[in-house]
Each structure stands twice: as structure tokens, then as C-alpha cells.
Amino acid sequence: MKQILLLPTMVLLMLCSCAGVKPPQTHYYLLSPPPDNSAEFATTPIPLQVELAQFLTRGTLVLQLDEQQIRRSHYHRWGAPLPGLIERYIQRRLQQQLTDELGSAPILTLIIDRFHGSQHGQVWLSGQWWINSDTARPHSFNYQTTQHQPGYKGLVITLQQLLNSASKEIVTQLQTKPITTATNGKS
């Protein structure tokens, strides 16, 4: 008789213990807006087109496991489509950093090949950018650093710092090289 009661009791205990396990929680991340140093920006927004490598378009944060292998996070996701997040972030940074208007609204194209971290704390941002009217070759960029805070939140903070470096490089190039446009041909 004891054995007959023991089996249902064990099944009941196992079911109760499974009910107490919570499923993993999904975390969503945004790029924090750059600090607003002034009430007004020096320039109007530059039209910006952002294209991402296909593996970055699924809405999840990505970790590189080794030279050829990546892993998408199941529970750590971007809070909005990543191209739009990057576009708004870079536009805002450029507005804050440019001191003069660029003339007839050049279109900036930004292609991102790497925007991810590794399980060992390395973080990458690489790709190229160009102005629609620029006859020179595209400008390549390749940033790599180590994240200073652990976890996915630290990864997002470090990715944002790399975007700051890229926007600073773009501003430097835009301010040192006159932009010619296809419409008027003037510098």
C-alpha cells in the first residue's frame, strides 16, 4: 500500500517543482541617445542610408564564437529594427559634431559588416561609408575593442562607443574634404 501512494506523491512533487521554474526573460536593448549638449543642432539631419550584413538583421544581439561561427542570442534582442536605431543614432551624432551645413543635402551611405561581440569580450564595428556625390573610393572603417562591463548590456554600451568613433571619423572626413554634388558640380 505504501508503494502505491509513493508513486503518485513523487509524480506530484515533480510536477510542482517544474511549475516553479520560470522561463528565461527576454531583454530588449536600444542605443541611448547621445547627450544633448545644446538646445539646437548646428546642422540639419544628413540623409543617411544604413545597410547591415544579413546576419545582423534578425533583431538579436550576435556573438562570434570563433573565426567562422556566430551565435544569435535568443533572449537578448534589439528593441527596434537595428538599421533604424543606427541611422537615428549616427544622424544625431553628426548633427552634434558638424559645425557647418554641408550644402545640398548629400546622402551618406553606411554599410556595416560587423556590429557584434565575442564570448571573450571583444567587440567589432566595421564596414564602409561614402557620400552619394563622392567620386572617391568608399571610406573603410574597422574598430575593435574590449568591453569594459560584462554581459549583453556591456556589449551594447561598447557597440555604442564604437558608433561614436565612426561618427567622429565621418565628421572629420566631411569637414576636411569639400563635398561636390551631382546637381551643381561645385565644391
Image (cartoon, rainbow, N blue to C red):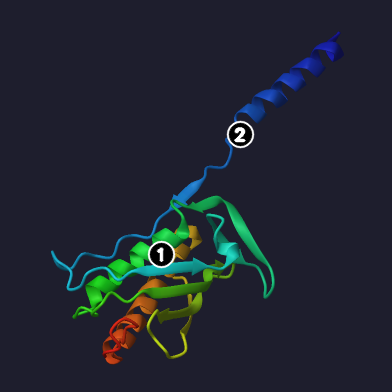
Q: From what the image shows, is residue 181 above or below residue 26? A: below
Q: Is residue 123 visible?
A: no
Q: Position of residue 110 (x, y in %)?
A: 44, 74
Q: Which residue is mark 2?
A: 21
* Quarter location, residue 36: bottom left
Type of amino acid under label 2 = Val
Q: Which residue is mark 1?
A: 86
Q: Position of residue 170 (x, y in %)?
A: 35, 81
Q: Position of residue 86 (x, y in %)?
A: 40, 64
Q: From what the image shows, is residue 170 above or below residue 156? A: below
Identify the residue at image location x=24%, y=65%: 35
Identify the residue at image location x=30%, y=91%: 177
Q: From what the image shows, is residue 166 above or below residue 116? A: below
The span from disc 2 to disc 1 (Cα, nearest Å) is 37 Å
* Quarter location, residue 4: top right
Q: Residues within 10 Å of mark 1 (few under 14, many from 20)?
A: many
* Quarter location, residue 175: bottom left
Q: Position of residue 113 (x, y in %)?
A: 54, 73
Type of amino acid under label 1 = Ile
Q: What SS does tag 2 mark?
A: loop
* Direction from residue 41 to residue 74 in the image, left or right: right
- Along the viewing direction, whichever of 5 and 102 lies nearer the viewer: 102
Q: What SS does tag 1 mark?
A: helix
Q: Earlier in the sequence, mark 2 or mark 1?
A: 2
Q: Is residue 8 visible?
A: yes
Q: Which image quadrant: the C terminus?
A: bottom left
Identify the residue at image location x=42%, y=89%: 135
